[in-house]
Image (tube, rainbow, N blue to C red):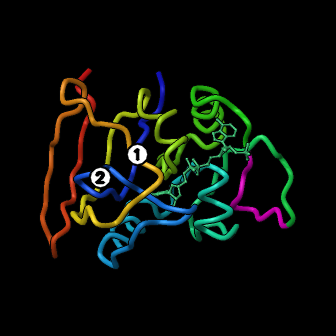
Amino acid sequence: MLADINIICLLESTTRAIGKDGGLLVSFKEDMRRFKSLTLNSIVVMGSTTFYKDLKGKPLSNRLNVVLTSKLEVDNLDNNLVLLNMCPLKVIEFLQNTYSDKSIFIIGGESVYKQFIDIATSLYITEFTDPSLIGDRFFPVIDKNIWLCVNCEESNNLLFKKFNRIK
Ligand SMILES: NC(=O)c1ccc[n+]([C@@H]2O[C@H](COP(=O)([O-])OP(=O)(O)OC[C@H]3O[C@@H](n4cnc5c(N)ncnc54)[C@H](OP(=O)(O)O)[C@@H]3O)[C@@H](O)[C@H]2O)c1
């Protein structure tokens, strides 16, 4: 059986935009705090664009950073950084076998969300509304036949939603 696979994302509710020019569209302190508290001591899986452009090649502290890339070399191999060139199922199998005690969070970007949404078990989505912010990367549509919203909290114009897979 596969491990629980959590996806976490901040998106614009009208367009589903998540980023532009390799960076976030916008960030919110409250969302960053929530992201940190949910992912702390877990495995965070991301694409190389998110790692090198968004995070500027700096691993998130107190988390095992897994970067998906076909270019398996890095200047400073940190002990909380792992580079993998694998399909989603192989990534999860590897992480489950190697770090069985840790939760797994898929943290983006677009290409990684698209690859993992079909095997994910939970989605942690923060929504904000500002369609004037034009993005060039997007989150997939959340199919209501597959995902049930089990929690929704509003705070400072942000909606924090949790979805569980129902089929
Ligand atoms: N709003 C949010 O919550 C959020 C979160 C994260 C990111 N973002 C945004 O999303 C955007 C980046 O998304 P993106 O789709 O352009 O890039 P990405 O998903 O971060 O990275 C894509 C790259 O990762 C590598 N890769 C992906 N899957 C792989 C696999 N299975 N095996 C090996 N390599 C793999 C490939 O690069 P190489 O093989 O060439 O290395 C691919 O070009 C940025 O704007 C970022 O700010 C938003």
Would residue 59 appear left or right of 136 to someone viewing this image?
right
Which label belongs to residue 7? 1
Which label belongs to residue 83? none
* Disc 2 crowd, CA 10 A, few/some/many (<14, 14-19, 20+): some
Rendered position, 20 above or below 103: below
Q: Amino acid at mark 2?
A: Ile
Span highlighted in magenta in the image: 76-83
Which numbered disc flags the more N-terminal residue, 2 or 1? Answer: 1
Work out whether residue 88 or residue 42 is closer to the camera in this orientation and state it: 88
Q: Which quadrant would residue 120 be assigned to in this image?
A: top left
Residue 110 percent location from the top left of the image: 49, 46
Residue 2 percent location from the top left of the image: 48, 26
* Disc 1 crowd, CA 10 A, few/some/many (<14, 14-19, 20+): many
Classify the position of the C terminus by image quarter. top left
Q: Are marks 2 and 1 in contact (CB under 8 Å)?
A: no
Would residue 27 appear left or right of 13 to someone viewing this image?
right
Rendered position, 10 above or below 99: below
Residue drawn at point x = 16 percent, y = 41 percent: 149
